[in-house]
Image (cartoon, rainbow, N blue to C red):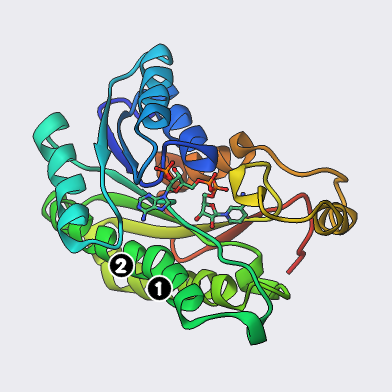
Amino acid sequence: MRFDGKVALVTGASRGIGRAIAVRLGSGGARVVVNFARNQAAAEETAHLVRQAGSEALVIQGDVADPEAAEAMVKAAIGGFGRLDILVNNAGITRDTLILRMTLEDWEAVQQINLRGTFLVTKAALRPMLRQRSGRIVNLSSISGRMGNAGQANYAATKAGIIGFTRSLAREVASRGITVNAVAPGYILTDIWNDVSEEAKQKAIEMIPLGAPGRPEDVAEAVAFFASDAAAYITGQVLNVDGGMLMS
Ligand code: NAP
């Protein structure tokens, strides 16, 4: 899958899955805008890896939940590289706890970044894509949003919401040559699991038919497929990348 001449914006690309997506798109020839929230050194490292893979990258700090920052990310793509072809809404957080212990702040923090952030960056990115009459939007959902997960009511609600958002937007913009799809990872080894107990991680592994957690690169391949010309006739779909954890 090649992306020569294409420009991609990947939110939350300083670490984990976002970094793997940025590097995968860059190695396919896309010029990549690397967004991050706090971790500048890690974002610069992602940009370095994109350049090492043979492409160009620029780094932009910004909270996806901030409307001005969302606009600035898209402006950075247009200003730096002249266009925007691929948006990957990857930035996401968890605040796991059982519902009776969940505070309104736990609920709202996850909504802000996972759902409001996806909405804001998508809205900003749609303008140039509509003008170009082409574009690819790939949203990060989660199998938690499809099957539910005790302790993740807030997170699962946002990840299920992303599926509804993906399908509605796919219908709205299909006639303009823009596809919108989602990838739903299972248990992928990144920092997002840092606060999860060893016992819960072991339980998750026992639910995986392929017997092990996935790598960020496994998710990046699925995102690259949706972003590629090979997926031109696919829109409104959700692809699980979960070692068979959820078969539906
Ligand atoms: P991660 O390792 O925790 O990395 C999160 C990334 O999001 C970082 O780059 C972080 O930037 C960025 N970020 C956080 N808040 C942000 C904000 N307000 N604005 C912009 N960027 C922000 O997470 P991950 O595991 O790679 O997850 C990536 C996506 O995959 C998320 O949407 C997650 O829900 C989804 N997912 C992951 C798994 C999994 O098992 N890992 C499973 C299902 C779905 P800083 O470095 O600057 O903090």
Secondary structure of residue under mark 1 = helix
> Would residue 166 be visible to someone looking at this image?
no
Left or right of residue 173: residue 168: right
Q: Label 2 amino acid?
A: Phe
Please determine whether, in this image, residue 158 is positioned above or below residue 10.
Answer: below
Q: From the viewer's perspective, is 73 left or right of 34?
A: left
- 4 in relation to 193, above or below: above
Residue 42 placed where, x, y %? Answer: 43, 30
Q: Which residue sits at x=35%, y=25%?
A: 44
Q: Residues within 10 Å of mark 1 (few under 14, many from 20)?
A: some
In this rendering, position of residue 212 left or right of residue 191:
right
- Residue 58 coordinates in the image, percent (x, y): 25, 28
Question: Which residue is at a point 69% across and 73% down the rendered structure image?
Answer: 151
Query: Gap between marks 2 and 1, in whole Å?
Result: 8 Å
Q: Quadrant of residue 65?
A: bottom left
Q: Closer to the N terminus: mark 2 or mark 1?
A: 2
x and y, in percent, of residue 101 in the image: 64, 81
Query: Residue 206 falls in which quadrant of the image?
Result: bottom right
| Residue carrying label 1 | 165
Residue at 24 percent of width and 38 percent of height: 60
* CB contact under 8 Å: marks 2 and 1: yes
Q: Which residue is mark 2?
A: 119
The secondary element bearing badge 2 is classed as helix
Q: Which disc, if any, is residue 248?
A: none
Quick one: 30 or 152, which is closer to the camera?
A: 152
